[in-house]
């Protein structure tokens, strides 16, 4: 039987109730430190306290111990959190991406408005899920889009209007990226170095991969946020890590914006 750690259940149930550790401690007649130790897994509640804790959170003891669902989406989220807690560090992002791919498909298929046939036999734990093409959905509830290995979600109910300074910054950045040579260099740097945080490319290497002249590469590099490495008087480059989310995102604009 799959179980959930009791400390994780107490954290989840307390937050679901909107209670602080102090309020839980007061309701149960224990110290704040006791509740803190339960939640940090330093110790477990005394077995005689379990009925009172279950009553406080309005669940059964089985639910408190994780032997039975404590409720819907919250329980699913808790199980996902526990699953990722146990994963090796280098596997977390891959697993998160596969879950996002499933969520995107569910939002567009039988689980929502049936825009696409849901491939119920698809194994998201093993499939090459990046081979998708383009799919988009924009509804009052929210938007989701996918092209190849880029997946986006946004809630329709939450809209934060950008400030004028943000729009000006966006306009400047889009203007820099509007040049073909800049895009070629950016995608070359991304494709060649994204899998190795220690890999840098020289102008000559970039020019060879991007099919540009060295002069064209040097001009394009001036428009990009870069990390530089100098060795023996020679410079090599890679995109700054904080900028590396942009290249996978930009191809989603290709079939959307009108030409002109």
Image (tube, grey):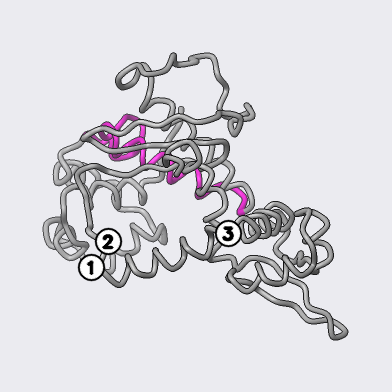
Disc 3 crowd rating (10 Å Cα; few below 14, some 14-19, many 20+) is few
Residue segment shown in magenta = 60-89
Q: Residue 32: which disc?
A: 1
As for residue 76 lying within the magenta part, the answer is yes
| Residue name at image x 37 percent, y 18 percent | 115
Q: Is residue 112 above or below residue 24?
A: above
- Secondary structure beneath dot 1 equals helix
Q: Residue furthest bottom?
A: 233
Mark 2 — residue? 35
3D distance between C-alphas at marks 3 and 1? 60 Å
Name the quadrant containing residue 168.
Answer: bottom left
Q: Nearer the viewer, residue 57 or 46?
A: 57
Q: Residue furthest left?
A: 27
Name the quadrant containing residue 138.
Answer: top left
Mark 3 — residue? 179
As for residue 46 lying within the magenta part, the answer is no
């Amino acid at each position: 039987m799959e179980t959930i750690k009791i400390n994780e259940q107490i954290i989840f149930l307390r937050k679901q109730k909107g209670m602080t550790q102090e309020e839980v401690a007061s309701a149960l007649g224990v110290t704040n430190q006791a509740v803190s130790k339960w939640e940090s897994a330093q110790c477990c509640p005394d077995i005689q306290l379990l009925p009172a804790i279950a009553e406080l959170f309005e669940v059964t003891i089985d639910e408190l111990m994780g032997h039975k669902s404590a409720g819907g989406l919250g329980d699913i989220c808790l199980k996902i959190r526990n699953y990722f807690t146990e994963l090796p560090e280098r596997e977390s992002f891959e697993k998160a991406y596969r879950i996002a791919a499933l969520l995107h498909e569910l939002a567009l298929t039988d689980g929502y408005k049936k825009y696409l046939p849901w491939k119920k036999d698809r194994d998201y734990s093993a499939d090459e899920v990046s081979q998708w093409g383009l799919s988009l959905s924009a509804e009052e509830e929210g938007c989701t889009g996918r092209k190849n290995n880029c997946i986006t979600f946004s809630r329709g109910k939450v809209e934060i209007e950008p400030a004028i300074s943000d729009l000006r910054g966006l306009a400047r950045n889009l203007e820099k990226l509007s040049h073909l040579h800049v895009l070629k260099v950016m995608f070359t740097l991304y494709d060649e170095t994204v899998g190795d945080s220690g890999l840098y490319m020289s102008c000559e290497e970039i020019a060879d991969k991007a099919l540009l002249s060295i002069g064209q590469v040097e001009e394009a590099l001036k428009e990009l946020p870069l990390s530089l490495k100098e060795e023996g008087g020679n410079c090599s480059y890679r995109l700054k890590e904080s900028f590396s989310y942009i290249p996978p995102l930009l191809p989603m604009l290709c079939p959307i914006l009108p030409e002109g």
